Image (spheres, rainbow, N blue to C red):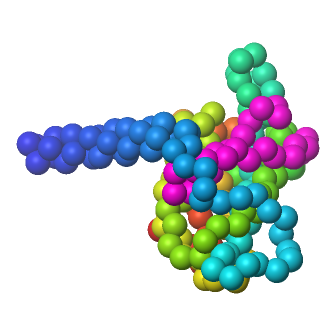
Amino acid sequence: MKKVNLLIITLALTVISGCANSSALLKASSTSTRSDVFQETIKGGSIPAGYADITVYASLKTHEPGAFSAKDVHGTPEYRLLINVDGQSTHLQGTLSEENIDSRRLMEEAGNGIRYRFKKSIRLKAGAHRIVVASPDDGFAVERQIALPEGISSELVLEPIYGKVPGKQRPGFYGVASFREGLEGFGVTLNGKPLQ
């Protein structure tokens, strides 16, 4: 019994520690400590020697505005993502559109909501970089190490990870995620390869 209790306490502390680490990372990444790491650019064109381009893409869905409170920015143009590369941060503003996917289908994004599409291209020195991608309004941040080859234009794609639907689990519905449960993180791929 003591082993089971110790295991439960260890798991709970690990989850709390992960949340605290994400909060600390979000707070640290929200402010730029540098301004010389990257510059925004338009995708395409020639890349100067010693540099690389990277375009960040994300497509995600949130609930409609005012679904939970009048102060909630989900579903509005004020909802943004944050990117921080080696201490320089910038916000990504998405383009919005209303979306209704047939809710009879078992999909994470089924139902009425607001679709966001984010895209930003930046130019920075080729080589290794630390990148943090965050959703300040959802309270999480993820950090990855990337390596960008000189003269190459890369694509960093953020795949939304939605929360799980609460309640009694039914056969066929175990672990079902939904955009209505909020965004919990991102899966990150660089040029089609997942980053851990």
> What residue range appears in magenta?
76-100
Q: Position of residue 152 (x, y in %)?
A: 70, 82
Q: Is residue 115 part of the magenta span, yes or no?
A: no
Quarter of the image holding residue 139? top right
13 or 102: nearer the viewer:
13
Point 67% across, 75% down: residue: 52
Can the viewer see residue 66?
A: yes
Can the viewer see residue 154?
A: no
Please state, as top left, top right, bottom left or bottom right, where the N terminus lies in the image. Answer: top left
Total labels: the figure holds 0
Q: Is residue 81 above or below residue 188?
A: above
Q: Is residue 107 above or below residue 21?
A: below
Left or right of 104? Residue 173 is: left
Q: Position of residue 180 (x, y in %)?
A: 69, 38
Point 70% across, 66% down: residue: 123
- Most extreme residue toward the left is 2
Q: Is residue 92 part of the magenta span, yes or no?
A: yes
Q: Main secondary structure of the magenta part?
A: strand
Q: Is residue 22 above or below residue 58?
A: above
Q: Position of residue 10 (x, y in %)?
A: 21, 45
Point 81% across, 46% down: residue: 94
Point 74% across, 47% down: residue: 92
Left or right of 150? Residue 132 is: left
Q: Is residue 159 above or below residue 127?
A: above
Left or right of 113? Residue 31 is: left
